Each structure stands twice: as C-alpha cells, then as structure tokens.
Amino acid sequence: MKRTYLNRITTIALAAVAVFSISSCKEEGGLAPEYMPDMYRSPAIEPYVDYGEVQGKYSNPEYTDRMSARNPVEGTIARGYMPYAYENTPEGYDLAGQNLTNPIAYSENVKAEGKELFGMFCVHCHGDKGQGDGTLVQRDKFPPIPTKFTPELQLPEGKMFHTITYGKGLMGAHASQLNQEERWKLVHYIRAEFMGLAPAAVPAEAAEEAAPAEEVAAEAAPEAPAGEEENHEAH
Amino acid sequence: MNKITNLTKESTLFKVFLFCLSFLFFQFNSYSQDGKKLFKANCAACHSVGANKVVGPGLQGVTEKRSAEWLHSWIKNSGEMIASGDGDAVAIFEEYGKVIMPPQPVDDAQIDAILEYINNPNDGETAAGPTPPGGGDLTTAAPEDNSTMIYVFGAAILLLVILIFTLNRTGLFLRETIAKNEGEEYKGPTTLWESLREVMRNNKGIVAAVVIVLFFGGLLDLMDGAFEIGVHQGYKPEQPIKFSHKIHAGDDKIDCNYCHSSARHSKTSGIPSLNVCMNCHKHIDGSSGKTFMYNGKQYSMTEEIQKIYDHLDYDRETQTYGDNPTPVQWVKIHNLPDHVFFSHAQHVTAGKQKCQTCHGPVEEMDVVAQDAPLTMKWCIECHNATAVATEGNGYYDEMHARMTPEFKEQVMEDGVITVKEIGGWECAKCHY
C-alpha cells in the first residue's frame, strides 16, 4: 500500500519535471515549435519560400526548379506596364530632353507626394536641399553629387525623368523601384522646390479638360507589377 | 611653366621671388591636399585615382600617357577636342559609350593640383595608416558568455550531491551503531533511497505541497508553452550575405522604402533584387577593406560585397555582367500562416504606418530579428487602439456626413475612428 502511494507521487513529480523541460524548449535558430506546420508553411506558392518547401523539407523531391521568384514568361508584359520609348544612350537622353513633358498636372498634393518620394529615394545622396550632400556623401561613401539642383541648373524635365529611369554616371537605374507616375511626381517636386520652376497649379477640372482622364491614366500607369517581378528575382 | 616665364618678363625680381616662394609653399604643404579636395568635388563622381573604371576611366598614370597640354584642354572642353578630330580624344569618346565628359569649371592651376594629386594620391594620408581591423564606430561588445555560469552551477550541484550522500552515509552509520550498542535490531533504512523514502513518509504534508506546486507550476508552464506554439518572436537567423540593417538604415539613413520599394504597392514588402544593391555597391565595392559587426562577429566588407558580385556574375574590373547569375537564398523571418491575409500596401500607403510599428527598431539591428509576436491578439489590439488617418481624406468627410446621428454618436464619441470601428475586427477582413 505504502509502496504504490509513493510510486504514484514519484510518477507525478517526474511527469511535472518532464513537462517543465519540454515546454521550455525552442527549436533551433529561435523558431518556436509549430503545431501542424502545414498551416504556417504552406506547400502552395508563397513569396520568398521555395516551391513545395515546408520547414526546410520538400514535399516533392523530384521537383528541381524550386525558385519561387521568377521572371515573367517571355513575350508577356505585366498589367499596367507602360513601355518607355527612349533608349539608354546619349542620343536617347537628348531626345527625352527634347520631347518628353510631364504628363501629371502640378498641384500642391503632387508636390507633397514628390517630397515624400524624395525622402525615400533621393535624399541619402542628393541631400534634403538637393545640393548633393546626403548622408552617404557626408559619411564619405560617395563623392559629392556633381548635379546640384539650383535655379541655375539648365535641365529639361525629360532628361530628369530619363536619368531616374536609367541612371546616369554613378547613379543607378531606379525604374524597378519607382513607377512612371512616381518618377514624374519626383520631377515636379525637384523642379518646384529646388529649381524654382513650379508650374502654375492647374485646378483639377481644368487638368481633366487638358488631358483626358484615360490618357493621364495610361501615361501614368504604374509600372509596379514589372518592378515587383524584378524584386522577386532576388530569391 | 609658361606662366612663370611670362611673369618674369612683366614683374620685378622681388615679385617673382615672392611668387616662387608661395608656389613652393603650396607645392610642399597643401598642393596635393587641394588637389584631393578638387578631385573629390569635380572628378570623383566619374573617375578614380586607381586603375579601375568608375564611369569614366581610372586615372592612374594618366599624366604619363598624355601630355599636360592635352589633359588641360580635355578637362576644360573635351567636346571641342572630339569635334576637332583629335585621335586620342575620339578613341576615348567611342570607348566610353559616346558620353562626353562635361567641361569642368577649373583653371590651369587647379588642373595642375588635380594632376599632382592623381600622381600621388596617398600624400598626407600615410600618417593615418590603414584602418585597424574592427576600428571605428562599428565595433560592439562581444556577446555575453554564460558558459562560466553553467560550470559554477554544475559544480555547486555536484558538491551538494556529494554532501547529501556522505551526510546520509554518516547518519545511517551512526543510527546503526546506536541500535547495535543498545542491543536492538536495526530496522531503519540502509541506503540513500530508503532513507529518502523514510523522510518522505514522515513529512507527507510537505511532500504533498511540493508535488502540488510542481504539478500546477508545470501546468502553467505547459500553458505558457502552448501559447508559444507558432509564435516566432525573437527569431533571428543569420543571412547568407551578412547585410547589416544597422549600417544601411541606421548609420547611412537610407529609407526602408528605398530597398523594400514594393511595400507601398504590394502585399509583400519585397526583398530587393540585386540591381538595387548595385545602385550603391557599384561604387562602394568594399575596397576600403573595413570590417563590420554582424551577430557579434566581425566580417570583412570586401568579402560580403564580393558575394553580391558573385551572385550577379559581375566583374568588378571590367564592370560587366556575366550571363550566369544565381539567386541569393535569404532566410525568411516574418511568416504569417496561410489562413490570414495581410497587405503591406494597406498598412504603409493607406494606413500611413511606420515600418517600425511592427518590425521594431530595425535600424538598430545588425541581424534582423522578429520584433512582434505576430499573433492575432497583437493584430487586433493595435486595430483597437489605432486611429484611421481620416484628415484631408474626402471619402471620410462624405461618409461621416451620411452617418445617422445615433451611429455617429456611438462611433465618434471619443473623437477618433479606430480601425476596429471601420471593420478592423471583422473576421472576414483578414480570414477568407
């Protein structure tokens, strides 16, 4: 009788200790245990996870091409993609400067959006005043940017757009990060804020008259889907 | 030299003497330094003083290759030289993609200073010497070492066990001796295990209390453990390329959106493709040989940046891309289960939320760790507390105008509209 009583106590105590040790363990690399991992890591396509991968194991070992980020099928274009007609050559640069004009009507809202974009994509090199003294220049990682946005700078908006699209000199191409609409908004902001070339803000109705809504939509159609595809290549 | 001979003709001996003196002074003290400054301001955006191509050719040894006269007229107006049909000029123009080097706003003396600097780029820098490994502001303390703690703890436990064992032995021996001396038969325990059971038998209350505490403690712990299932807060894997967010987002102050550019438009924030890396790392190629800290260990910038080039099959010397690029297999950190929908665009663009709200101070992390638990409780608590950015949004003005007075009173009683109040707690908003 005593023996069974004591045995029971020992068993319970051991069970408690076991529970302690199990519950406080984490999987390797800081991952917590997962109950039914299929719910967390699906065999279906997920961004930045290989095809058919569930926690490092593959559902179909015969499947060899597992990369989830792929280029679009050849000959297809993403929805909303707008081609850019000028080539990445000195001639294309000059042509863009002569022929391209900003399709987006200028307004205070557009300028504000441009300012936000400038803070995201330009400021670390060009500086918050556009004088080529951003943090990367201050920290001596980049030479001072030769182009300073001042009222004296003679630079047509088409050339600015072309440069954001393809890059120029040390500056890289930003077409994968900014769609055409955003690039034109940036051009508006830079010209209005630093170069003293703010076009007269067009009232919304007049703008619609001047450029039919469809045309604006088409020209400003985001290139984002294409950009995203490019982004996915990283994986 | 022309300048000096001209001057001697026109000026007195004294003036010449002064001029030469100042010339010497400049040459020995600040000539090269001025050249360095001028070079950085005017040339460095496209040229290096080494042999490597940047945008234009590397300028090492250029003063031996070309005459000073040729260089002067090239720097002042290269377009004119090309137009005049100078053989060398046209050859360079063709080689570098027919891009004209813009005329530089420098005078002859400044050009000489720049050329002087190109010849001796390391003047005045030798004293500083190479950066010591791990120097600068990048070093941080080594991670805490807790292996000593384990040893001390283990030794203490071992001591205790030995102590219990010997004391028990002595006690039993004494009891046995006493029993023998008193002529009685010894019935007590003879081993450690038996004496332990005897102690437990005599203190049933304490034993029961300990067991109860252990049991419920274990139960509580089990529940805590159950809440941890699938919650990867603090998950901090090392990445194949030791990319430090602390350097890029913290020190260099590059906006999150620069690299994660699809967060504004898409469901996913986007891991940047390597072309985005190359926007900067075409120039910042790690040739400084500096080191940086990542996960408490020191890494060489040269080696880590070289990994980008390897993946792109990019040749640093010729600045050309090969045709055999390979993907970087970054380790995914934040993972939401399949049965919940989440869109970055909705939170970043429409909701105007800062990245740090959910991802924590990434700009202070060299290795990114999951900061938030990403549980449903965490989601809806934020939806309950966060006000919708209604200001300046005509849609909401219209919506508020159309509300019935009772409903408006109910919703607007605290003056703000939270995400919950526009449906942020509806199941089907995220689960469908």
Image: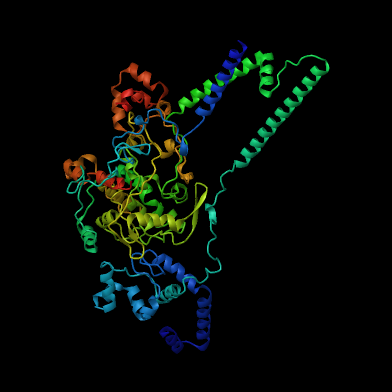
Question: What's the colour scheme?
Answer: rainbow
Left or right of B387 on screen, residue A76: left
Q: Position of residue B311 (x, y in %)?
A: 35, 54
Residue at the (45%, 45%) spot, across then down: B238
Q: Using the image as rendered, state which of residue B69 and residue A3 is in the foreground.
A: A3
Q: Using the image as rendered, state which of residue B248 and residue A68 is in the foreground.
A: A68
Query: Does the image show residue B420?
Result: yes
Q: Position of residue A71 (x, y in %)?
A: 25, 47
Dividing the image into 4 quarters, which one contains the C terminus of chain B? top left
Dividing the image into 4 quarters, which one contains the N terminus of chain B? bottom left
Q: Position of residue B325 (x, y in %)?
A: 30, 54
On screen, B20 above or below B285?
A: below
Displayed quadrant of residue B396: top left
On screen, A193 above or below A90?
A: above
Number of disc labels: 0
Left or right of B225 on screen, residue B85: left
Left or right of B404 on screen, residue B248: right
Q: Using the image as rendered, state which of residue A194 and residue B64 is in the foreground.
A: B64
Q: Residue furthest right?
A: B181
Displayed quadrant of residue B416: top left
Q: Position of residue B206 (x, y in %)?
A: 66, 16
Query: Does the image show residue B80?
Result: no
On screen, B327 above or below B114?
A: above
Left or right of B11 on screen, residue B283: left
Q: Using the image as rendered, state which of residue B365 and residue A59 is in the foreground.
A: A59
